[in-house]
Image: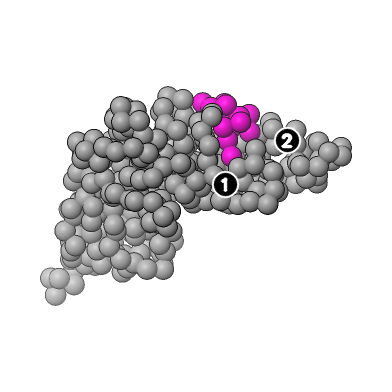
Amino acid sequence: MLSAWEVGGNASSVHAEGRAARKLLDDCREALAFSLGCLPQMITFTASGTEANNMALRGAGAERILVSAVEHPSVLAAARVSGKQVDVIPVDSQGRVDLAALEVLLKGPNVLVSVMLANNETGVVQPIADVVALARKAGALVHVDAVQGFGKMPVNFGLLGCDLMTVAAHKVGGPVGVGALVIRDGLVVDPLLVGGGQELRRRAGTENLTAIAGFAAVAQEMSLNIKALRAELESALEGAVIFASEAERLPNTTCFAVPGFRAETLLMNFDLAGVAVSSGSACSSGKVGRSHVLDAMGVAPEISSAALRVSLGWNSTAADVQLFITVWKQLVARHRARRAA
């Protein structure tokens, strides 16, 4: 990224500085494409995963959109404002898409199915291969929001078999403010932003070359290997309900609750001790309420209202996990002492 800052040209210009910027942009696109298992021209750079999700759902040529009940708010909101008919695919108690319900909903022409690769709150990995197989049989398009899974599990556009895929850099240590929409070759998607010919006329505006360079760099890093840390953390959650514990999950995500605790109280106490955890989606910060994901899974309100999400990051260590465990045990002991009194 520091090297990219030295490239002062506009990648759309034909002078020497512009050509240097274009070469860097092309190199980054090729590196990201190699990592994602797609052709470079399939990648459209955006300012975020949210923008890419909006572009996919609002720009794809479909009359009806099917979204899972546990999608990220950027997918659910984009579907609602698309002007198209929207139907919600239910999930089971572990947060996995109900494939039988999806098969029924797929009846009818011009359908776009949007199912995330892995959930941002629970870490549950969805059966994308089965979703794609059902959609192909029905002649439907498939969009996969892979932002949460990127860098934590294999994310290969070609192997997933979908038509559209969203990724972003910031959840694995890359820069904030850059994402990408991978679009199957030959598929037409209307741009959200117009007024320029950048990104094969799919997204107007001068590319953020510095952030894109960081995106390409982080895509070439090894996947996070922190499953042992998560296992250690979860072993200390005595008496807690760990949501979706029976499903395949990302190696870094734990969503749990203990009846009798309040999520906002736990958040504040962890924060004061130097531990950053979340309640619900991070994009909903500022309002601590029940999670739509846990509601869709049928979790009782008194439990979902106490839910916390712990995410291990690219730089998390065993010491971080030990700090979390220490603080958690102190909070539990304090809670039990108050109840005993």
Q: Mark 2 points at which residue?
A: 24
Using the rendered image of the protein, determine whether residue 31 is visible from the camera's viewpoint. no
Instruction: Sort mark 1 into few (<14), some (14-19) or many (20+) by Cα contacts within 10 Å.
Output: some
Indicate the position of residue 112 as horizontal and vertical percent values. 38, 40
Compared with 252, 241 (above or below) is below
Where is residue 65 drawn, in percent x and y?
36, 46
Badge nearest the viewer, 1 or 2: 1
Up-down relation of residue 102 to residue 298 (above or below): above
Quarter of the image with the C terminus is: bottom left
The residue that mark 1 highlights is: 191
Horizontal arrangement in the rendering, residue 318 relative to residue 301 (left or right): right
Residue at image point 25% right, 41% down: 105
Whether label 1 touches label 2, CB < 8 Å:
no
Q: Nearer the viewer, residue 326 or 4?
A: 4
For marks 1 and 2, the one nearer the N-term is: 2
Give how far across and how far down residue 297 sits, in percent: 21, 50
Position of residue 54 measured from the top left corner of the image (x, y, whole percent) = 48, 50
Range covered by the magenta-colored residues: 29-44
